[in-house]
Amino acid sequence: MKIVSTEFIRSCDGPEQFPDDRLPEVAFVGRSNVGKSSLINSLLNRKGLAKVSSTPGKTRTINFFRVTTTDPSARRFYIVDLPGYGYAKVAKSVRSHWRPMIERYLVNREQLRGVLLLVDARGTEHHDGTTIQWLQQVGQQPVVVATRLDKLTRGARRSSLGAIQESLNLPSAAALVPYSSVTHEGRDELWRAIRGLLLKDQG
């Protein structure tokens, strides 16, 4: 899939602000500070498109990025960056706004074609397990992306990824995409997974 252009469209505090042009959407979900913004920048080959912060919980809105490609079956679509979960230092009042907004988006958004669940390649946490279970309960079978692959030695990768597959009860190794935003390892595999999500309901 060759990218023609990428564009940040808007940050949204609620569904009334979501784009209404009916383009298909793929959502990125993950705990705070798992590297969602860095992965989006790497995936789209646009440094600085998604704002990266060293402070967990910085993304507090639903952010829409419009992508145009040369693929006739997936010409234009949105990548949607959702606020991270599981960061205790974010004010309770803020988290109480995030959660229902995120859940409404994931359950009700007609344009949503699929979800990418980002976890740290070095290991999962409790929130990752509860999130994938909830997604499955509402009818989503997410593609799991193991971020920060570069933090693992070659020798440690197989055992760590195997532990992730087991802890999240993934059906096979094919359900897990290892990714490094530093080296861009896994980018082609992730684009294939995204294309599959975009096309799954077509003909």
Image: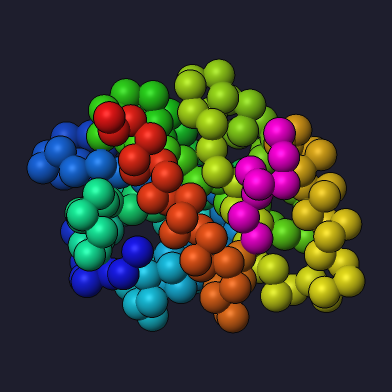
Q: Tell how many labels.
A: 0
Nearer the observer, 166 or 88: 166
Specify whether 179 is left or right of 152: left
Specify whether 110 is left or right of 185: left
Q: Is residue 129 visible?
A: yes
Magenta-span inclusion, residue 175: yes
- Image spot of residue 195 (x, y percent): 38, 50
Q: Quadrant of residue 136?
A: top right
Nearer the observer, 65 or 1: 1
Applied colour scheme = rainbow
At 70% across and 75% down in the image, what residue appears? Answer: 150
Quarter of the image that includes the C terminus:
top left
Nearer the observer, 200 or 166: 200
Residue farthest to the top, as pictured: 137
At 25% across and 49% down in the image, what residue appears? Answer: 73
Span colored in magenta: 171-178
* Relative height, residue 98 to residue 134 (above, below): below
Q: Quadrant of residue 168?
A: top right
- Image spot of residue 135 (x, y percent): 54, 28
Magenta-span inclusion, residue 88: no
Quarter of the image that includes the N terminus:
bottom left
Specify whether 185 is left or right of 9: right
- Image spot of residue 65 (x, y percent): 27, 58
- Image spot of residue 18 (x, y percent): 20, 41
Q: Is residue 51 visible?
A: no
Residue farthest to the left, as pictured: 21
* Relative height, residue 192 to residue 111 (above, below): below
At 51% across and 67% down in the image, what residue appears? Answer: 187
At 63% across and 43% down in the image, what residue appears? Answer: 175
